[in-house]
Image: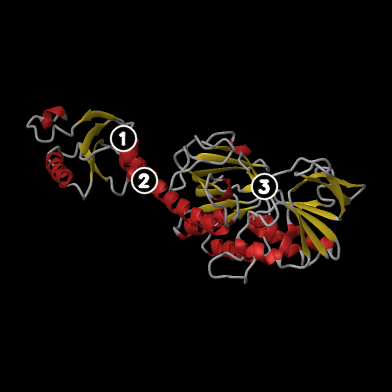
Amino acid sequence: MPTYDIAIVGGGPAGLTSGIYGARAKLKTIIFEKAIPGGQAFTTRELVNYPGFFGETSGPYISKKIQDHAIKFGAEFVKEEVIDININLDPKVITTNKGNEYHTKAVILAPGAEPRLLNVKGEKEFKGNGVSYCATCDAEFYEGQTVIVIGNGDAAIEEAIYLTKFADKVIIVVIHDEGVVDCNKYSAEKAFNNHKIDFVWNSILDEIKGNDEVSSVIIKNLKNDSLSEIKCEGVFIYIGSLPRTGFLKAQVEMDERGYIVTNEKMGTSVPGVFAVGDARNKYLRQVVTAVNDGAIAAVAAERYIFEEDEFKERILESPKQVIIAFWSPFIPESINRVALLEKVVSTTDGRFRLVKIDTSRNQRIASKFKILNVPAIYLLNQEGQKIYDLTDKIYQKDLKSVLGI
């Protein structure tokens, strides 16, 4: 199995954007997506907040355009599900449901999230037979009928509006007091002014009823605990999502909800592993923030690969013993010391290889040696480990004796 530079697990907007940036950088890039590229964005019929496309685009359209962009630059797509991953090996190993193994230098995790279940009576029994979590996927089955929408965030209200293109009546069950919803004001106003939409306030879904398919729901009023039955043919549930991170088996740091913890470069707790999109611990989960994540992660992965390859080539695979010198163009003293060191090394008849590391550019190698201040100069063994600190020896006349010259 060939080794890839970047393997991207998940083909939503974040993963697809990483594919664009990775492939454009001439890195061998592979994207794993078990279903249709686009993730949850693909299930959103109308996108009203993607910059430059006000009321003019949809999730499927944007998803397809981003995928085409990634393919144009050479990203490879594999329709397989990642079921296991060993990110502590070098190279890292990804295993899919087809039993295939893929090796990669860097991994970008973009598994996305899946709808959270209410776990009320009838929900599991009628899933696919009247219970849905995707209006884009299933709205057409409810032409001229009545449907219930559970939730009041952006997804719930926007999907309810889309459902009115098919259903005769859309009833939104809201846990809050009358007039209070958690979605953006634009969508709220559209819903309030839509004659096909009714709201049931201060209520929750208690039960879903039917025979072979949904025929009604039981709604519980939170003010007086009364129960009421509403006839309907479909129930659409939007109460949040859960990250698809179970396959990681806690190999990277996650928060208490299972979302992956990252830094500003999308780096996880494991070097060479990045996380993007809805599975990442973040403030806002939108298509626009997903593509932002994807771009940052791919650029960071590119830098990681470059510095790792440089470390192996210049240090671990060096035929000569290495002296490594950390410096910065912003610190004159480090420039002076490295210049003096170069003169000394030039008199050693080629016995040593001087590797100069600009810490303003090569942060990965600097972090390997836990460099806090420059200049820092070390003599290394063949395994790339420091065996002698030469930082303060550069001015001493016995430097050559220290080096055994």
Between the residue at mark 1 and the residue at mark 2, the CA separation in whole angstroms equals 13 Å
**Marks 2 and 3, how far apart in space?**
35 Å
Residue 345, can we see it? yes
Residue at point 26%, 36% (across, down): 320
- Name the residue nearer the viewer: 21 or 120: 120
* Viewport quadrant of the N terminus: top right
Tell me the quarter of the picture where residue 374 sits.
Answer: top left
* Residue type for callout 1: Phe
Q: Do the residues labelled 1 and 2 touch (CB within 8 Å)?
A: no
Residue on which disc 3 sits = 114
Q: Which amino acid does label 3 sit on?
A: Glu
Residue type (three-letter) at the residue carrying disc 2: Glu
Tag 3, which secondary structure? strand
Residue drawn at point x = 84 percent, y = 60 percent = 146
Of marks 2 and 3, the one in the foreground: 3
Residue bearing the label numbered 2: 307
Where residue 37 sits: x, y (%)?
Answer: 64, 57
Residue under label 1: 369
Residue 194 at x, y percent in the picture: 73, 67
Q: How far across and down, in percent of the image, does residue 350 sit?
A: 18, 39
